Amino acid sequence: MAQKPGIPKGTRDFSPVEMAKRNYIFNTIREVYALYGFQQIETPAMENLSTLMGKYGEEGDKLLFKILNSGDFMHGMTADEVASTSTLKLAAKFCEKGLRYDLTVPFARYVVQHREELALPFKRYQIQPVWRADRPQKGRYREFYQCDADVVGSESLLNEVELMQIVDTVFTRFGVRVCIKINNRKILTGIAEMIGQADKIVDITVAIDKLDKIGLDAVNAELAEGGIPAEAIEKLQPIIKLSGSNAEKLQTMKEVLCDSEIGMKGVEETEFILSKLGALAGESMLNNAIELDLTLARGLNYYTGAIFEVKALDVQIGSITGGGRYDNLTGIFGLPGLSGVGISFGADRIFDVLNQLDLYPKGAVSATQLLFVNFGSAEADYCLPLLAKVRAAGIAAEIYPDAVKMKKQMSYANAKQIPFVALVGESEMAEGKVNIKNMTTGEQMLVDADQILDCIQ
C-alpha cells in the first residue's frame, strides 16, 4: 500500500471554509489600509541571502530557510570545503538565496532599491507569507502570514495616531473588543537612566515585558538574575505597579523622569499621541480603549520611539497586533536617516479569536448563494440561461453537474451551506416557473423565472 502523503511540519492546509474565513480577515485589513491611503506592494518569496543574513541576529540567521543553488551547487568547491563540518560555511557556498523571514527587511531593501521612484512619505501595506525554520509547536508555524503597514520618510507623530485609528477600525469591523496598549522606547530608556542602570536597558525591559505572563515576583527575580542591584529593583517597583488614568500616569512619569532628557522626550511624544486619540474618542471616533502601559517593551533593539500592542478583551490569547517607530529602517542597506513607523496584524491569532467568538459573517463563509438541482438534460438546458442571469446580477450560483438522486444533490447543498436551492421539473418548465427552497427555514416558493432574484435577496 502506498504511503499516505503529508506536508512538512509547521505548515498547514486550509479547507475552503478556512480559506473563506482567512480571506475575510485579509480583505477587511486590506480595505482599511486602502481607506487610509496605503498602497499595496509585494516582494519575492525568496531574497538574496546577502539581503537577509545579519539582519535578525545570530539566532535569526539560524532560522532562515536557505535554498540550494540550481544545477551543480558544489561546482567550484575544493575537497576540503566539501569535507567541512561547518554547516554555515557550507550553506554560504551552496546557497545564494533564502525564503524571507519577515516583511520588514525585504521592505527596507525595496525602499532603497526603488528610492528614486517613491514619493515620500511612502505608505505601503503588504500581506504575504513568511518562513522561519523554527521548532513547530502550538501557535507557532514555519509558514505564516504577516499583514504589515508602514510609513517611511516622515517623523510626524500623526502617523502613529493614524495607525492606532487603523487598528481601532479593523477590530471594530471584526466586532472584537480590544485594548490598544501604548508605550515609548525613550520612556523606557529614561527609566533605566533614572535607576542608574542605563547599560541594562535590554535586561530590564525584557523582564518587565513578562509581567502579565509570570507575575511581579518572578519579574523581580529575573531582574536580580540579570545583575540589576536590589536598590535599582526597588526603585522600579512604583513604575511597574503604576496605575490610574493615562493622564495620571503621564504626570507621574514627568516627575520621575524630569532629569532625563530622552525620558522627557518620550513622555512628550506619548502625550501628543494620547491627546489626539483622546480627542477622537471624545467625538465617538474611536471604539476601543487606549492604555498607556509602562511595562510594554517589544523588540527594543529595533524600535526607537512609540511602541504598540493590542490585546483581545474577551479571549485569552497573546498580542494580536503590534508595531512601533524605528529611526533607521534603511540604514542596513546604506541609506541612513529614513525614519518610519509601522504595525502588523497577527492574522493567525485573529483567525483564532474570531473562531472562538463566532464572529464571522454568514456571507463570509458560504460563497454560493443558489444551487440549481439537475433533474436531467432538458431541465439543465432550461436552468442554464437562468443561472447566467443570476450570476450577471452578482449572485454566486451553480448547477449540480450530474443528474443524480435528489438526496445527493441536497446533501451537497447542505455541505456547502448553500442557503437557497432552485428546483425545476417538467411542471415548472411548462409554467415558466421555478421552485425556490430556503434551506434554513425549509420554506418553498413557486415563482416566475424573473422573480428568482427577489426571493434570494
Image: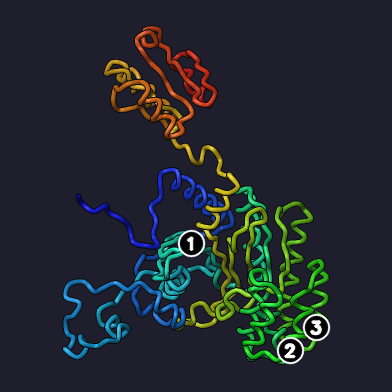
Residue 292 in view (yes/no) = yes
Q: Secondary structure at mark 2?
A: helix
**Residue 260: mark:** none
Residue, x 46% and y 33% (percent of image)? 417
What is the spatial separation of the Cα atoms under label 1 and label 3, in whole angstroms?
A: 41 Å
Q: Nearer the viewer, mark 2 or mark 1?
A: 1
Could you say which is closer to the camera, residue 403 or residue 345?
403
> Is 158 displayed left or right of 149 in the figure?
right
When asked about the image quadrant of residue 107, the answer is bottom left
Dot 1 amino acid type? Lys
Q: Residue 274's x, y, as percent?
A: 74, 66
The answer to whether 442 is drawn above or below residue 114 in the figure is above
Q: Are marks 1 and 3 in contact (CB under 8 Å)?
A: no
In percent of width and height, residue 288 lies at: 70, 55
Where is residue 181 shown, x and y percent of the image?
A: 68, 66
Q: Which residue is mark 2?
A: 232
